[in-house]
Amino acid sequence: MLISKKVALITGAARRIGAEIAIKLHGAGMCVVVHYHTSQQAAQQLCQRLNQQRPDSAWAVQADLSQTAHLALLVQQAVEKWGRLDVLVNNASRFYPTRFGKITEEQWQDLFDSNLKSVFFLSQAAAPLLTMNQGCIVNLTDIHGDRPLRDYSVYCLTKAGMLMLTKVLAKELGPLVRVNGVSPGAILWPEGSSELTEQARQHILEKIPLAATGAPTDIAKAVLFLVQDASYITGQVLAVDGGRLLSG
Ligand SMILES: NC(=O)c1ccc[n+]([C@@H]2O[C@H](COP(=O)([O-])OP(=O)(O)OC[C@H]3O[C@@H](n4cnc5c(N)ncnc54)[C@H](OP(=O)(O)O)[C@@H]3O)[C@@H](O)[C@H]2O)c1
């Protein structure tokens, strides 16, 4: 099967890293389903741009991934357009601080629903279609699923869960579906993060052996590699972090 006949669903793909992944997979010839939650305008603009490059090759679909009941419908909508699904990229995520001692059950629920439960049930809903086409799943995890980040304990736990989920799904879905992950380091600073001062950013940069933040395209290239050129790789998570995991 040529990659140009394949269809990829990328969650949280209207903006930032998700959009770059959609652009990269589209550039490799795939049709892309651009999932969004609140960023409708950005999703539609991205699809318009991609459809100008290649007619009928990008489509935007809305869903709140924290609503488990919506996930099967999202898969159904993704398949309806081109009649198949080959790749699922679980990119959507919530990221905000939770100060230990003041963490509420609502915050726990919100982060786990959006970052982990949704990935599990979306993958389960997509699995029969991916199996049919010998497809693959790529999960966007985080180096902080491995190394704790102070004040982000719940987020770190969700991403640690995603690391195991990648391995679990690789076992459950083999031999016909490969499941891998990409674990970004510092790529794009979080939006509206007034608390991340220039000094804090400098501190992070000092811990990166390659001495710079990465670019969304670094992540997108790793995703494309795992989709296109990794036929004997499953259950692995590739850190794309400038070497950040090497530092204490
Ligand atoms: N940025 C980095 O440097 C970095 C570092 C380490 C790991 N990562 C990981 O890489 C991935 C992409 O990072 P990013 O910074 O580009 O992500 P982001 O901007 O924080 O979030 C991506 C998208 O997730 C969607 N989303 C959040 N909650 C949702 C929900 N309940 N239902 C549906 N969609 C939801 C949002 O879509 P809408 O805008 O449509 O609402 C958002 O645009 C994430 O998994 C992140 O954890 C990123």
Image (cartoon, rainbow, N blue to C red):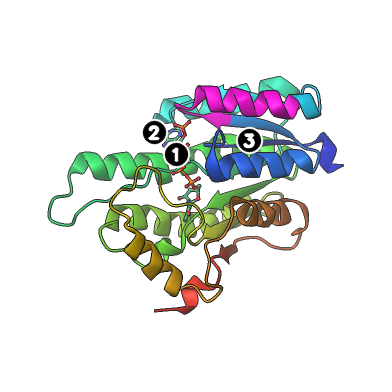
Dot 2 and dot 1 residues touching (CB under 8 Å): yes
Q: Which residue shows up at 48% across the image and 43% down it?
A: 119
The quarter in which the N terminus is drawn is top right
Q: Quickly name the residue at label 1.
A: 118
Q: Which SS class for mark 1?
A: helix
Q: How far apart are marks 3 and 2 (CA)?
A: 17 Å
Magenta residues: mostly which secondary structure? helix
Q: Which of 18 and 85 is in front in this view?
A: 18
Q: Which residue shows up at 52% across the image and 62% down it?
A: 213
Range of residues picked out in magenta: 35-51
Sequence order check: which comes first, mark 1 or mark 3? 3
Q: Quickly name the residue at label 2.
A: 66
Q: Which residue shows up at 59% across the image and 55% down it?
A: 215
Q: Is residue 13 left or right of residue 47?
A: left
Does the residue tagged 2 have its C-beta within 8 Å of any atom of ligand 1? Answer: yes
Coordinates of residue 34 in the picture (x, y in percent): 61, 31
